[in-house]
């Protein structure tokens, strides 16, 4: 699953138009798509004919009560808006989120946690961010592997683009979150030289991270929004439809970083019927310990991992079903699990890795080799 934040702090750049029509175009290509409206103005919801006033519970309720037992979940507020296309709508109440969560621990990962707990599967999740760089946008970025920045062809937009990419990169570095930025030129007017000059300037600075597709200025896109319909249903003969279909096809070509994912599958925490098998790669490490809320964060001798000849450290820990936070201590230095994409911001502002242990049914573990798990248990305990 790919999660993409559509983000720009500047209004009027076609951000919501991109979110709606890219989602619909991916859905028309057979992909299961969820669009999350993170903007309190609710324009993505309105653009898909969902009235914010009719919502009994909304995204605000899900994000605010993420740690409560009887909390609402994302599935409770999903609106089905088209074939292969679902929407998480928003309303004005979401604007209170930043003030309410100002000093709350883990405030930047509320959306990420909500997505991780979803049972319904999607190929793509797109997030329409508000036109500002604040806590709502940070939640969207923390939940995403990719960010698309729509840019209109103007000098001020080009100047703001540099500031925005710098902000995203600083945010990603501070929280050790890798996010790939892609630039999309919108409202392109082929009759003006300025549009072409801006496009060339963007390609010069962002090179392969610039989409080759441009979204031309097209009045039919505005008309489709006013009718609460994506361009895929409103007019399949206009240039706006062709542009977004081309963009969707280009998005499908964004690499998945297969090597990184394969490494994560091998070295990340792997729930087995005996508990969780933790793995870490570090040939130069002399001592490695595993601590977490399951052992009161105590680095005693029982927390030590065993080193194998290839430099991989492993330990099998028996854990009942539930969600656990943990870290490694490598030669005295506390580190999160770099091979595990799931994490939270703890109450001290640091990062804890997260592993979920499912409820197992006897002999029903999918893709598991009981003999291998037994050998691992005998070797590591």
Image (spheres, helix red, strand yellow):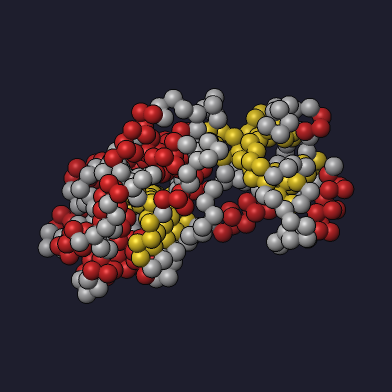
Is there any visible trace of residue 223 in the rendered image? Answer: yes
Q: Residue at x 72, y 38 (%)?
A: 284
Q: Residue 184: image x %, image y %?
A: 30, 55
Q: Is 48 situated above or below 133? A: below
In the rendered view, does 130 fall on the left or right side of 224? right
Q: Residue furthest right?
A: 378
Q: Residue at x 47, y 61 (%)?
A: 123
Q: Residue 221: image x %, image y %?
A: 20, 62
Is 17 or 319 nearer to us in this picture?
A: 319
Q: Residue 45: image x %, image y %?
A: 30, 52
Is 257 or 235 nearer to us in this picture?
A: 235
Q: Could you say which quadrant of the image residue 190 lies in?
A: bottom left
In the rendered view, does 101 fall on the left or right side of 44? right
Q: Residue at x 76, y 52 (%)?
A: 273
Q: Residue 306: image x %, image y %?
A: 81, 41
Q: Which residue lies furthest to the bottom in this view?
A: 237
Q: Is 122 situated above or below 334? A: below
Q: Could you say which quadrant of the image residue 368 lies in?
A: bottom right
């Amino acid at each position: 699953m790919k999660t993409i934040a559509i983000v720009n702090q500047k209004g009027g750049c076609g951000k919501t138009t991109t979110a709606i029509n890219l989602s619909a175009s991916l859905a028309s290509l057979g992909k299961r798509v969820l669009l999350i409206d993170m903007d309190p103005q609710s324009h993505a919801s309105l653009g898909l004919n969902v009235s914010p006033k009719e919502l009994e519970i909304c995204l605000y309720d899900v994000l605010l009560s993420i740690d409560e037992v009887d909390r609402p979940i994302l599935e409770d507020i999903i609106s089905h808006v088209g074939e292969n296309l679902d929407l998480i709508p928003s309303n004005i109440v979401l604007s209170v989120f930043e003030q309410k969560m100002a000093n709350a621990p883990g405030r930047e990962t509320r959306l990420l946690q909500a997505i991780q707990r979803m049972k319904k599967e999607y190929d793509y999740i797109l997030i329409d961010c508000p036109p500002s760089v604040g806590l709502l946008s940070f939640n969207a970025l923390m939940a995403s592997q990719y960010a698309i920045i729509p840019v209109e062809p103007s000098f001020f937009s080009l100047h703001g683009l540099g500031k925005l990419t710098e902000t995203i990169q600083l945010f990603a570095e501070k929280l050790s979150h890798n996010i790939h930025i892609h630039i999309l030129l919108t409202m392109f007017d082929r009759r003006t030289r300025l549009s072409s000059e801006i496009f060339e300037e963007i390609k010069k600075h962002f090179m392969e991270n610039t989409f080759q597709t441009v979204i031309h200025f097209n009045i039919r896109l505005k008309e489709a929004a006013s009718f609460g319909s994506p361009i895929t249903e409103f007019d399949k003969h206009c240039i706006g439809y062709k542009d977004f279909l081309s963009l969707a096809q280009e998005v499908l070509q964004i690499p998945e970083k297969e090597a990184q994912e394969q490494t994560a599958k091998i070295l990340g925490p792997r729930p087995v019927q005996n508990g969780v098998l933790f793995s870490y790669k570090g040939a130069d490490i002399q001592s490695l310990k595993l601590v977490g809320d399951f052992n009161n964060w105590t680095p005693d001798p029982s927390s030590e991992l065993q080193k194998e000849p290839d430099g991989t450290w492993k330990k099998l820990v028996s854990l009942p079903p539930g969600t656990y936070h943990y870290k490694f201590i490598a030669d005295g230095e506390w580190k999160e699990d770099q091979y595990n994409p799931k994490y939270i911001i703890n109450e001290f502002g640091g990062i804890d890795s997260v592993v979920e242990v499912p409820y197992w049914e006897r002999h029903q573990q999918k893709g598991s080799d009981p003999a291998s798990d037994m050998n691992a248990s005998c070797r590591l305990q």
